[in-house]
């Protein structure tokens, strides 16, 4: 009975909290009504600070691995970036815009990390283009609102596009020019996971079974974790 009660603290980014976790947390609450959930949102740097102060049980994030050296990081799913424009924008007629076409317009995208390189800027640099970044924001919804306002074209995660709520926008693929990203779930190495903790992990990513998680709980480093999942087909989330 006691393993059906307790608390679970999760630190994540806005995109995960807004677009990925709601159905997961709803299902978890239905199965474990005695477990109190605490959801913390922040940037990678802010989340790393929460981890350093031992305030959270799980982290769900993308990138920023250098900020979390003491966590066991498990691959959850992959996602792609897309280009979002108003219906009357010139790129609305282009199904797969090129780097040069993107560079010709002001860009609105996620705020760049303070602690590491930007993969987006690197892509433009390799193509010999300089992006005109008009605005950056941490919040996917904010990016879309400024796209609607005509400030620029949006480059954001495909999981942050709602087919119904964002029906007024046109979504164009960037898979041919921008590599996919992997969202991971992390917990402090040496942590004692409760039964409901394993259940939560499996709800976020079904391939992260209790057996697989236990196999890497006491791993010496992230290399061992990566090796365990090297042959696992990490799904794309849509």
Image (cartoon, rainbow, N blue to C red):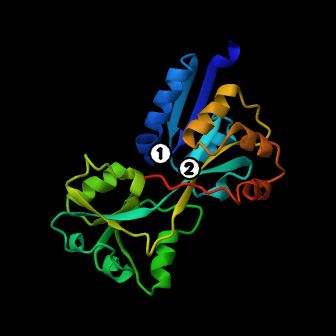
Find out whether the residues at labels 2 and 1 contact each other: C-beta distance under 8 Å.
yes
Please tell me which residue is depicted at 45% across the width and 87% down the height of the picture.
128
> How many marks do you count on the picture?
2
- Residue denoted by label 1: 16
Check the image and report above or below for 82 versus 36.
Answer: below
Check the image and report above or below for 188 versus 127.
Answer: above
Q: Residue furthest left?
A: 88
Please tell me which residue is depicted at 36% across the width and 80% down the height of the picture.
98
Please tell me which residue is depicted at 73% across the width and 53% down the height of the picture.
69
Q: CA distance from mark 2 to mark 1?
A: 8 Å
Element at label 2: strand
x then y, percent, for residue 30:
50, 22
Of the pair 12 and 83, the residue shown nearer to us:
83
Instruction: Say whether residue 5 is left or right of residue 153.
Output: right
The numbered dot on residue 61 is 2
Label 1 Cα neighbours within 10 Å, binned few <14 / some 14-19 / many ≥20: some
Question: Which quadrant holds the N terminus?
Answer: top right
x then y, percent, for residue 108:
34, 64
Label 2 Cα neighbours within 10 Å, binned few <14 / some 14-19 / many ≥20: many
Please tell me which residue is depicted at 72% across the width and 47% down the height of the picture.
72
Q: Residue furthest top?
A: 1
- Using the rendered view, name the quadrant where residue 210 is placed: top right
Q: Is residue 135 visible?
A: no
The numbered dot on residue 171 is none
x then y, percent, for residue 10:
57, 36
Of the pair 217 and 124, the residue shown nearer to us:
217
Q: Is residue 117 visible?
A: yes
Element at label 1: helix
Of the residues under marks 2 and 1, which one precedes in the sequence? Answer: 1
Instruction: Say whether residue 191 is left or right of residue 160.
Output: right
Instruction: Say whether residue 40 is left or right of residue 211.
Output: left
């Amino acid at each position: 009975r006691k393993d059906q009660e307790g608390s679970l603290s999760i630190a994540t980014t806005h995109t995960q909290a807004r677009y990925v976790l709601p159905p997961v947390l709803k299902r978890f609450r239905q199965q474990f009504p005695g477990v109190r959930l605490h959801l913390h949102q922040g940037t990678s740097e802010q989340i790393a600070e929460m981890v350093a102060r031992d305030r959270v049980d799980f982290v769900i994030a993308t990138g920023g691995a250098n900020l979390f050296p003491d966590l066991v990081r498990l691959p959850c799913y992959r996602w792609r970036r897309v280009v979002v424009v108003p219906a009357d924008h010139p790129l609305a007629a282009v199904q797969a815009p090129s780097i040069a076409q993107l560079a010709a317009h002001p860009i609105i995208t996620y705020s760049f990390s303070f602690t590491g390189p930007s993969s987006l800027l690197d892509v433009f640099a390799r193509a010999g283009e300089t992006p005109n970044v008009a605005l950056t924001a941490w919040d996917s919804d904010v990016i879309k609102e400024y796209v609607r306002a005509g400030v620029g074209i949006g480059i954001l995660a495909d999981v942050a596009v709602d087919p119904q709520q964002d029906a007024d926008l046109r979504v164009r693929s960037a898979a041919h020019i921008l590599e996919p990203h992997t969202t991971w779930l992390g917990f402090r190495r040496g942590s004692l996971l409760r039964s409901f903790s394993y259940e939560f992990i499996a709800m976020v990513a079904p391939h992260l079974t209790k057996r697989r998680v236990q196999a890497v709980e006491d791993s010496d480093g992230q290399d061992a974790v990566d090796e365990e999942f090297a042959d696992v087909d990490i799904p794309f989330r849509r």
